[in-house]
Image (cartoon, rainbow, N blue to C red):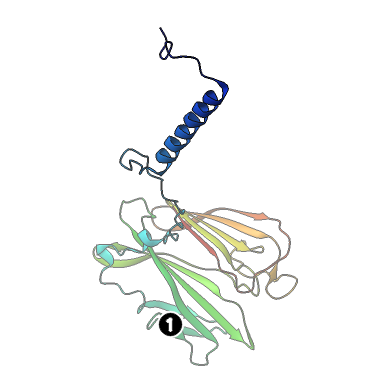
Amino acid sequence: MFPFSKLPPFDATERKALLLAIIGSLLFLSFLVSISPRNHASSAPIPPKRVPAKPAPAGDSFAIYRIKPEQFYDVDFWNYYYGRYTLHNGKKIHLNLTNSQLESLDGSDRFALKDVYYRDVTGDGEPEAIVWLLHVHCAGSCDGGSNLFYIYTVEDHELKPIWQYETGSYAYGCGLKSITISGRQIVLELFGHCTDQKMEDRGPSKFAVDDSTFILLEFDGRGFRERSSEIIETEPTTVKSFEPGIRIF
């Protein structure tokens, strides 16, 4: 039997009053539920907004090659005598750097140490020193600089040079575009036509040059010898204040 089945029937007024009472009760219960405190322990926390971190600055890709090996501890290439050097006018000077610098007596030639790297380039398992110098010649105006490279090894506790090379200048052709050192090989990329020991190739104007020359050198057990060279045709390029690419693998 249903609840209230034995009660007498309601008239219209009573049914209306009962209906309003039920609706009011439901609304009141809904209000109580909405204002009751929430159980924070069981509710899922709102995750904080994440701001992407800025990428770390790129590290020095050559740092590992600047670590001085033990056999070079006593060598200071910043204050070092690189031997006799012949200037443009034929005069010979002592290329002796002090605090990484040297300037000729008349001020027309300046030398500066650019960097020193250490890597095995002979295949004997021991690192050699790769020294990079910049030489700027000025006669009324400056030539933008040529690049000098020296490679030294250590034999019987003595420093021994196994390679020396000077490029042309950026103003008058055969300036250094890039140097790549990998294993026992060196690849030089120079601006202009630079073959047969010719280290000058004047372009259409000063600091403008056509084409590029690639020179492959390989260590033959005593020094680096040229294995091949190739000229690549390119459009005229302005090379004033150019910074060459250095690659070591």
- Residue 68 located left or right of residue 105: left
Identify the residue shown where x is 25% and y is 64%: 71
Image spot of residue 173 (x, y percent): 65, 70
Q: Is residue 23 visible?
A: yes
Q: Which quadrant is the N terminus positioned in?
A: top left
Residue at screen point 42% across, 70% down:
115
> Is 38 situated left or right of 107 in this image?
left
Instruction: State whether residue 100 is above or below residue 58.
Output: below
SS at mark 1 in the image: strand
- Name the residue at the right extreme: 204
Residue nearer the viewer, 147 or 93? 147
Residue 88 in picture, x, y percent from top left: 57, 81
Q: Nearest the camera: 219 or 206?
A: 206
Q: Amino acid at mark 1?
A: Gln
Say which residue appears at 43% left-offset and 11% top-offset. 5
Q: 22 or 188, which lies in front? A: 22
Q: Where is mark 1, residue-wise? A: 101
Tell me the quarter of the picture where residue 68 sits.
bottom left
- Tally the numbered discs: 1
Task: List x then y, in percent, for residue 52.
Answer: 46, 53
Relative height, residue 6 to residue 241 (above, below): above
Q: Is residue 187 left or right of residue 4?
A: right
